[in-house]
Image: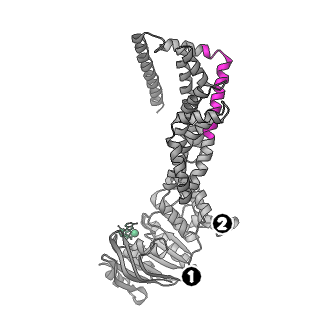
Amino acid sequence: MIEFINVSKKFNDLKVLNNFNIRFEKDKITCLFGPSGVGKTTIANIAANLTEIDNGEVKVTENAVYSFVFQEPRLLEWYSVYDNIDFVLKNVYNSDKRVNIIKDYIDMVELKDFESYKPKELSGGMAQRVSLARAFAYPSNVLILDEPFKGLDMKLKREMISLFKKLWNESKRTVLFITHDVDEAVTLSDFIYILNEKPAKIIDYINILEYNDVSEVKYRLDI
Amino acid sequence: MKGSILQSKYNKILIALFWIFVWEIFSLIIDQEIYLPSPITTFYALIDMLKTTDTYITILYSTYRTVAGFLISCGAGIVLGYFCGINKLVYDLFNPLIGIIRTIPVMSIIIIAIMWFKDTNVPIFVAFLMCFPIIWTNTISGIKSTDVKLLQMCKVYNINRLRIIKSVYFYSSIPYIKAGMISALGLGWKVTSAAEVLSLPKYSIGRFLYDSKVYLEIPDLFAWTFIIIMLSILFEKLLKIFLRGLYD
Ligand SMILES: Nc1ncnc2c1ncn2[C@@H]1O[C@H](COP(=O)(O)OP(=O)(O)OP(=O)(O)O)[C@@H](O)[C@H]1O
Ligand SMILES: [Mg+2]
């Protein structure tokens, strides 16, 4: 579980968070939903301990191991698709095990024929899938997904979403999921926080389990 | 495609001929071989030179000195640049020293080196002191240019420092190091022959430059200068081919 208690964060003079509180439940998928620039990525970075906060406290269950699908793919452009995934798994698995795991995940994101390609030779959506494979393959217990399915066509997006669901059902992780897409939010999330205003405020909170009818949730998201 | 390559070769030859023509005109106007020998005289001087074995031995020795100075600069510049790039304290320690080396006039370095070293090693040492700061600076700029976003990604995935240095900083700095090596090599040729003129090793282009001044054999001076330019261009090409093999 990750919990923000009265967290404040400024960039120069811009207050992004002011006494902000939020919880990401253990092994649940929590969605951050809100307009561009509201501070979603900032919250994700703070949760992953990549950004220092000015005030407040961030409580993280010990032994948190992260993986992160960033808003951009963030691949090492001098390494192939295969080596980019190998890069993060090197300290985790021995080489025999790695080979199988990497091949499996490259297969899952449908890049089988591209494992020796360099990032520059990939399309945006392909690079995004490498970033997904890297995050899924890494044995984390906290998974942060910052607009993970952008740049994918409808069919691939559906496939990646069901892949994510399947992997998550096989081994649960605490997921922080950021999206602008109402359908994605409704299909995947357990909880949805709707953010707005500056500094960011939670203007609505939805527990999907309380709803039988998704159209009602969609209605609330359609602000 | 092929046509345009041919075309550009053809253009290059025309441009070269144009400037040789300009040179010829000036030498006709001045009409004194001592000030400006004509292209033809220079060409004959060059042909004469290329008939003696001493010329080749001289070229080999001067090349050896330039390349040695260059390689030592690369080795020291890259290694020290790395440590300075990733550690602020090491950087602060070495920065003033290298700042001073950078501002010392070449002539002072040459004269000091003549007191310290055997004549044949003076140019190597001087080339090293001149080229090393370039490589050092470029290595550091390369490391500083590393994308913070990639470093964040490494932090998330718990990549240890040694592997970050090997797999991230190293590749990020390569384009900068390459550019530094190319400018250092060009400078190396100039500095080496300057140091040779003052230290006068037995076989050295610098000694021949000096002699041609003393004996007023100005076409020889031009011919040797031409040789240095050609060597410099040739080695820059070789270096670029070698560097292309590395990651771009
Ligand atoms: N490193 C930074 N330096 C300065 N300002 C920043 C920095 N990172 C974010 N900001 C500012 O903080 C605010 C929130 O940015 P953030 O990236 O968290 O938004 P977001 O909700 O993720 O938006 P989007 O949906 O467009 O990705 C923005 O106004 C942005 O300009
Ligand atoms: Mg964002």
The subunit carrying tag 2 is: A
Q: Secondary structure at mark 1?
A: loop
Ligand 1 appears in which quadrant? bottom left
Asked which quadrant contains residue B212, the reply is top right
User: Which sits in the foreground, A41 or A79?
Assistant: A41
Answer left or right for A37 relative to A2: left
Q: Label 1 amino acid? A: Glu
User: Which sits in the foreground, B245 or A52?
Assistant: A52
Residue B204 at x, y percent in the picture: 63, 25
Residue A54 at x, y percent in the picture: 41, 76
The subunit carrying tag 1 is: A
Check disc 2 and report the residue beneath it. A98
Q: CA distance from mark 2 to mark 1?
A: 26 Å
Instruction: Note whether B248 is above or below B65 in the view shown.
Output: below
User: Which sits in the foreground, B133 or A168?
Assistant: B133
Which is nearer the N-term, disc 2 or disc 1? 1
Q: Is mark 2 within 8 Å of ligand 2?
A: no
Camera-nearest label, 2 or 1: 1
Q: Is mark 1 within 8 Å of ligand 1?
A: no
The magenta region covers: B48-71
In the rendered image, residue B231 lying in the magenta stretch gets the answer: no
User: Which sits in the foreground, A73 or B40?
Assistant: B40
Crowding at mark 1 (Cα within 10 Å: few <14, some 14-19, many 20+): few
Q: Label 2 amino acid? A: Arg
Instruction: Note whether B27 is above or below A116 in the view shown.
Output: above
Q: Secondary structure at mark 2?
A: helix
Asked which quadrant contains residue A21, the reply is bottom left
In the rendered image, residue B64 lying in the magenta stretch gets the answer: yes
Answer left or right for B8 relative to A140: left
Check disc 1 and report the residue beneath it. A62
Instruction: Note whether A112 is above or below B139 in the view shown.
Output: below
Q: Main secondary structure of the magenta part?
A: helix
